[in-house]
Image: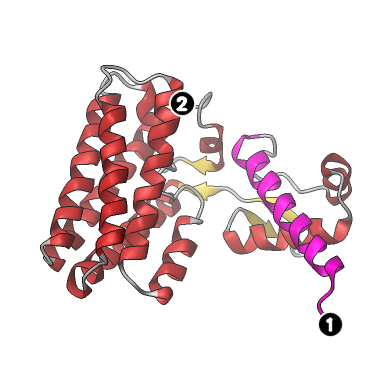
Amino acid sequence: MYTERDETGGSQAVKAQLKLREMILAGELPGGARIAELAIVERLGVSRTPIRAALMRLEQEGLLDALPNGGYAVRTFSERDVSDAIELRGTVEGLAARLAAERGVAESVLGDARACLDEVDEVLRQPALDDESFTRYVRLNQRFHNLLSEMAGSTVLARELERVVNLPFASPSGFVVVQADTPRARDMLIVAQDQHRQVLDAIERREGARAEAIMREHSRIAQRNLREAMQGQHLDRLPAVRLIRQQA
């Protein structure tokens, strides 16, 4: 029977999962390191049961490897793993855009998407982006991609897209911080924003093939950011890059 204790335990497991993910991506738990369960219990101040549930979820998410003799270790990824995850996200988002165009989208959702992109335009009108503006861009970028998933009108596709973007480094903003450190940062964000506008236009015009192609191309920006991140110039802002093994 469901009890209040079950709800509390579930909440603690989610909080532990979020904190552990944050620690891994911040480089506090290095790649290959075995997770010391008792140390995590003491550090997070929760019992072993929610910690074990959190570790299991992070393994399912792909950030941890289950060890043969029990326990978990922080997973490392090949550059190809990450590139494939980004490619998969582009493929699924392309499908979402095509279905949205073919099936039609409620005007209220289209209005939300337009308003979101208007806010992005406002951010990009600045000649240079400070940390606050860049953080706002990341938030709005994520919102637009979430709206794109909603536009497809498919719970099956939404579930799969959620799973894909939770793959390590595959989210729409997974490597966007790399752009903040380059001289052409604002120019690249303007290119991405133009693609946002173009895909929304294609959806409104019911041009499915065009919408799908634009979103596939849109993921190429993340591929470029991955290559730049692997050059090792962004470890201070993106320490999780240390989890990625460079290709020989």
Look at the magenta stretch and give its main secondary structure: helix
- The residue drawn where x is 23% and y is 47% is 196
Up-down: is 39 above or below 130? below
Q: In the picture, residue 22 is in which quadrant? A: top right
Q: CA distance from mark 2 to mark 1?
A: 50 Å
Q: Answer whether labels 2 and 1 touch (C-beta < 8 Å).
A: no
Is residue 26 visible in the rendered image? The answer is yes
For residue 20: magenta?
Answer: yes
From the viewer's side, name the closer residue of 81 and 165. 165
- Reply above or below: 49 against 23: below
Q: Position of residue 75 (x, y in %)?
A: 62, 51
The C terminus - image quarter: top left
**Amino acid type, residue under disc 1 in the picture:** Met
194 is higher (above) or lower (below) than 67: above
Q: Earlier in the sequence, mark 2 or mark 1?
A: 1
The magenta span reads: 1-27
Is the N terminus in the top left, top right, bottom left or bottom right quadrant?
bottom right
Residue 240 rendering spot, x and y as whole percentages: 55, 37
Estimate the x, y position of residue 191 in percent, counting from the top left.
20, 36
Using the image as rendered, state which of residue 74 and residue 94 is in the foreground: 94
Q: Which residue is mark 1?
A: 1
Look at mark 2 in the image and give the residue it sits on: 234
Chosen colour scheme: secondary structure
Residue sitting at the far bottom: 1
- Image side of residue 212 versus residue 163, left or right: left
The residue sitting at 40% across, 19% down in the picture is 130
Badge 1: how crowded within 10 Å, few (<14), some, or many (20+)?
few
Using the image as rendered, state which of residue 168 and residue 111 is in the foreground.
111
Q: Secondary structure at mark 1?
A: loop
Q: Quadrant of residue 149?
A: bottom left
Give the amino acid type for the residue marked by disc 2 in the picture: His
